[in-house]
Every structure is written in structure tokens, then in C-alpha cells.
Image: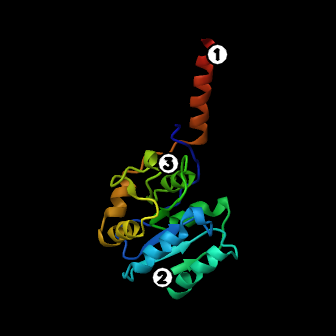
Amino acid sequence: MSPGTISPPKLPSRRGRISNIAFGYFGGGSKHKGAHVLLEAFRQIRATNVNLKLYGNFPDTEYVKKLDPVVNSDERIDLMENFGRTQLTKILAGIDILVMLSICYEAYGLSILEAFANSVPVIATDIGGIPEIIHDEHNGLLFKRGDVLGLKQKMERVINELGLVQKFRENIPRVRSVNEECDELFSIYEKLVRV
């Protein structure tokens, strides 16, 4: 599988000692993106030096209506406006760690590459192609799909272990640009044509 590419501009991310951890989520109100797992885990975290920013489309569905009481009763949770690709880098600069909770198998996580390209580590489920990008305890954290307690524990580690986010940032691999990927594919095709 190709390691994937992305080429967003870089903005400075939140660095240094972080006193208030900002978690980000981009899955919106799609059940297969696992917002219910995240909100249940976050609800159980007692720390006050945390913030959860929920991005994406949250349509008026029965699923989203079940999430509303948790979102509306916790001042640490911010329901953010949906955003366009041109705003992604700025948004990533405002979070410390992205949480990706796919309930269904992801062949590969473009959101992870976008986060990595902006020096933002990721907590994610250990399914599909995700473990090919995130190496648990090295450049992010993995947990079992649907495991509320497991996610809560991973988030609490990020909150309580000073320097953990920075360690993960330092271990994020370089994300190749689209041009680099195209050059490599072109080279492969040239070799195949010569055979």
C-alpha cells in the first residue's frame, strides 16, 4: 500500500508545554465515524484542562439528537462550524491531537496524513490500514474499535503525561508530497514499459 501523500502548507502548531489539551474530531455526525464513542469517553474524563473541538456536518438525525445532550451539557466541548479544505491547516494548528474513531474499516486514513503533515499526532482505532500509519506509542496511540474505556485511558494519558504529545510529534514521519508520489509512480511505469 502506498504511504500516501498530502501537500498542505504548514502553520505553526501548538508547541511547548501544553497546559490545556485540545482534542480535535473531524467525523461529524456520521455514525460510522464514532462520535458516540468519543463523547462517552470524554464525558467520563474529569480533567478541566481539556477541550474537545467537534468538526464536520452534524445533520438533524436521530443519531445526532442522541449526541446533543452530552455536547450541550459539557462546556469543555465545542461544536465547531464545518470547514473547507483551505481552512484545514489553520484548524489543525489549533488542536494538539486528532481523534479518529472509525467504526468501519478504513483502507487508509487521509485525515491522519493531513494531521501528520501539520505535526499533529493522532489517537485512532486499530482497524484497517490505520496501524500502517500510526505506530502505537511511537507517533500516536491506538485503541480497539468501539472501546470507550480504552479511548478514555488513551486520552487521559495525553492529558496527564507531560511531553507525550511532543514525543509523538517528533516521531511523525515525513509525509510525501503529491509531486513526489507522482514521480515515483511515473518511474515505476517507465520501468514496466521497458520490460
Q: State which mark lies toward you, 3 or 1.
A: 3
Graded by Cα atoms within 10 Å as few (under 14), some (14 to 19) or many (20 or more), the crowding at tag 3 reads some
Q: State which mark lies toward you, 2 or 3.
A: 3
x then y, percent, for residue 145: 45, 59
Q: Which mark is residue 193?
A: 1
List the residue tagged with mark 2: 76
Amino acid at the residue labelled 1: Val
The reply, left or right, for residue 164 in relation to residue 85 is: left
Q: Which of marks 2 and 1 is nearer the N terminus?
A: 2
List the residue tagged with mark 3: 128
Location of the C terminus (image quadrant): top right
Q: Which of marks 2 and 3 is nearer the N terminus?
A: 2
Name above or below for residue 68 compared with residue 26.
below
Q: Earlier in the sequence, mark 3 or mark 1?
A: 3
Q: Distance between the residues labelled 2 and 3?
A: 31 Å
Amino acid at the residue labelled 3: Gly
x then y, percent, for residue 34: 54, 65
x then y, percent, for residue 48: 39, 83
